[in-house]
Image: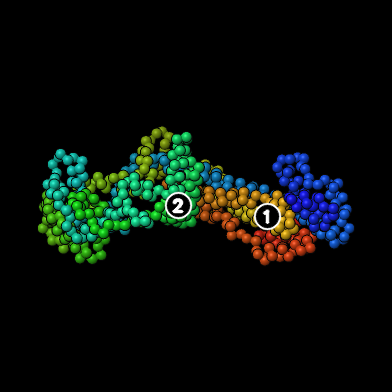
Amino acid sequence: MADIKRLLNKKGWTGKELGILELTNMATLFRQRISGNQNPTPLVTKGQFQKMLSSITDSTQGRIYNGYISIHEWLSLFYNIALTNEQQAQLRFKSLSSYIIEASIAEDTYSYIESLPVIMTEKQYNEAVEEGRRQWLKEEDGTPRGDSVLALIFRAFEYYAEKLEKEPTKANPLKPIRKKYLSQTVKSPLILSRFNEATENGYYVLEDGRRSDQMTDEEWEEAVTTPKMGQALKEMHEAELIQPGFMGITAEEIAAQRLIDRANIIYNGGTNWDADKAQEKKDYEAGLAMPAKFVLYDEPPADLTKWDFLSDSCAVYEVYSSSLGGMAETPDEYIAEAEDFIAEFKELVELLLKDIDSKFFKGETGLSALPVEKWETTVFDWEQLYEKDFYGFRAETDRTDIIWDGNWRAQTNGIAILKPTAFSEKRLDENGYYVPPQIRKTLNEHSLEAFFSDADGYADRADEIEEGREALLDSYYFIMGYNTAIDMIASYYEVPELSAFKLNLEGITTKIDALNSIVPMLYMRIKDTQYEDQELKERKLQVLKDFFPPLDYKSLAIPQENIDRVKQLFEDFQAFKGEESISDLMFYRKAPSEDEEGGDADE
């Protein structure tokens, strides 16, 4: 602006100087108007400017000034066209996002259903229990599932061990064994070599060598709390004191971004594990977590007692995975583990084999005299164990998590038995099963079901979405090119104040980013919701993939050769009065037709 004051104080002016003054005055008035000033103050009055303009007598200087006038006219035209594109972008965003927002509202119905118990008739319930039990007792191919001898022994141990813990004063054959094994440490090389891995027995170590097992809990917490994490935690604490439930701005932003990042990974086919690992890496890079490596101890605990080991069922199954878990690839592998178990827990094995023989196999071939070489091939199918109620096998089989395996709502919310009434028959099918109402029919046309190929108006709706997405990207590209052109003009013709005519491209990218975020969020929400109709769930997820993939505006760029050509056209103001147009070179993703170009100009 100092240069403008200098121009105003001169006695004579060149065409370029008056052209710069013309455009600067135009930008100054424009900036004041958009700020709400209805009576803007010009840099120079019309009378003053006309006197200055009359001082130009050289035709060359006159042509140069007229070149700046052509820029004025170009700006007057294309600012309005760009403004129309900005408004179109806002309308297209509103239209596209409305589908996702309303679809999210529709999902509230499914979330509500997820929290309800499963409704069924008494007949339906009994048949479902029977079917759940049958599936548990047999393999997927229908063949019986069974236990080898070692598995039977450990089943008996777990049964008595649980009784001993819950009813310590009652008679229990394990009491003398427990007393003895609590004072005996494990000697088995097999157990000792696998124990740390089976139980994840280890410690964390920081990059500077500090170890979690050599610090108190308080010292470790302080060690892994980074300055940035500490600041976030402090803000969370202060915010909670002021407004319960509020985490503070920093923590809220971190939490929101984490959710968005997680949703994007799930949307793109990743698993929860992938999302956890990606977040862990991002936390390290952002200074929100301290890298710590987990290391297993080289040696097992020196004071590991036999009873402690046996009481950890997960550890037992991990250590003896070949024999107890059915993972043995050869008979020798099974026999080796069984012999190791016998050698380490001889008294227990003998006690339980006799107990099994006396309680469940009276008059049948006993297990006590069976050589270990036959333990793997002597298999008792689970239906037989269920019939005999082998050490609580019935109660174990009939647990709700087993009977209702695969039915999340039944496991979590329970079962509601429908009692018949005078009008309840309309809710039953020919088998006497409860028929839930068709929710899809109650949802509006902006739910994701509206994009199923069998939905009314599907084709028109699909075209509307595609056109909206393309139009939004077209508007983004137009404004990106327009703003770039303004910067180039301002620089080349030395009128920095022309930046006043640039539009808010960041506002459009923010909206596109928001749309690109809410789609994966809805996708993750649907994926995490427990649908009874899995086909419906998968179809809705596919709709989000097919119709609402991310809008990749970041890959859009004006070709460098087009930018270079516009720079050439700036010479002698050809860009504003010649046949080649800045708009054709920089504003359109696809070359516009004459009608489109003319239509924009008319507006």
Amino acid bearing label 2: Gly
- How crowded pointer 2 is (Cα within 10 Å; few <14, some 14-19, many 20+) is rated as some
The residue positioned 52% from the left and 52% from the top of the image is: 544
Q: Is residue 211 left or right of residue 476?
A: left
Label 1 near label 2: C-beta < 8 Å? Answer: no
Q: Gap between marks 2 and 1, in whole Å?
A: 36 Å
The residue positioned 78% from the left and 61% from the top of the image is: 573
Q: Nearer the viewer, mark 2 or mark 1?
A: 2
Residue 401 location in percent, x, y? 32, 46
- Between 38 and 152, the residue placed more toward the observer is 38
- Between 529 and 495, the residue placed more toward the observer is 495
- Between 166 and 1, the residue placed more toward the observer is 1
Q: Indicate how the structure is coloured in the image.
A: rainbow
Badge 2 is on which residue?
287
Badge 1 is on which residue?
483
Instruction: Say if 24 sits above or below 115 in the image.
Output: below
Residue 480 location in percent, x, y? 65, 55
Q: Quadrant of residue 344?
A: bottom left
Amino acid bearing label 1: Asn
Q: Is residue 20 left or right of residue 536?
A: right
The residue positioned 39% from the left and 54% from the top of the image is: 291
Determine the secondary structure under disc 1: helix
